[in-house]
Amino acid sequence: IQERLGIPTSAGAYDFNLGCSGFVYGLSTAKGLIESGQATNVLLLTSETYTKHLDADDISVRAVFGAGAAATLISGREADIEGAEESIGPFVFGTDGRGASRLILREGSLREKVEHPETPGAKLHMNGPDIFAFTLKQVPASVEALLAKSGKSMDDIDLFVFHQANKFMLEHLRKKLKIPAEKFVYALEDCGNTVSATIPIALRGAVNEGQLFGGESVMLVGFGVGYS
């Protein structure tokens, strides 16, 4: 991609694999690189091709996942006013490796097809009930932790953009957190769960739908594979 875009060879490039939480972690990494003076502009690419690995007989994954990608440019700028509120962050993180086997593609999700696609490891495995239970417990806790860290209340947030896992799960989370429907973004109907690309795709959709204009306070929440 660096070569195809004509980006100078002095630019750094690397891959990281985090699935459902990848966009949020990528934003944090970009913020750290810029604030520490290691970079001025970061192009964050989130790209997923899980559809190559779906088991046609497994309706729990076949009806949920899609393939998709997004490109997000994060640029550094001088603060307009000393002590002004930061544009990105703060962040809270979490990892529970005990849930790794509940949602996993053991042979990876690469551009090229795996050598033996008929083998069990080449298919995406998801334990839906366990994922659902993890999400209902940990996502509200993460939201509360982020509000506490940022010194904000739910009313201070203009828009909530969660990882677009599936409509059923998102509705449960929205109701549990008592988020008004008009402040909650859904962006699954045309593309499904595109894993690390769901949040930026949802942000683009929010702009297109007139939910996001610029300058709003937006909470982004990634969760899932890992567990993360």
Image: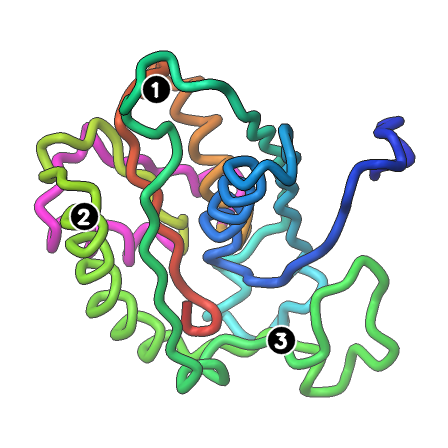
Q: Position of residue 74 (x, y in %)?
A: 56, 30
Q: How far across and how far down the image is residue 161, in percent?
A: 33, 39
Magenta region: 166-192
Instruction: Give coordinates of residue 32: x percent, y percent.
Output: 51, 45
Q: Residues within 10 Å of mark 3 (few under 14, many from 20)?
A: many
Verify whether residue 155 appears in magenta.
Answer: no
Question: Which is nearer the N-term, disc 3 or disc 1?
Answer: 3
Look at label 2 and name its amino acid.
Arg
Q: Nearer the viewer, mark 1 or mark 2?
A: 1
- Contact check, label 1 and label 2, Cβ < 8 Å: no
Name the element at disc 1: loop
Q: Is residue 12 left or right of residue 125?
A: right
Q: Number of marks in the image? A: 3
Amino acid type assigned to the residue bearing label 3 in the image: Leu
Q: Closer to the camera, 16 or 206?
A: 16
Name the residue: 36% across, 61% down.
Answer: 93
SS under mark 2: helix
Residue at the spot x=56%, y=77% of the render? 104
The quarter of the image holding the N terminus is top right
Above or below 179: residue 209: above
Q: Locate residue 129 relative to residue 30 in the image: left or right.
A: left
Circle 3 residue: 105
The residue lying toward the viewer, choosing from 143 and 124, is 143
Residue receiving disc 1: 212
The residue under label 2 is 174
Disc 3 secondary structure class: loop
Question: What's the residue at 47%, 47% (across, down)?
Answer: 28
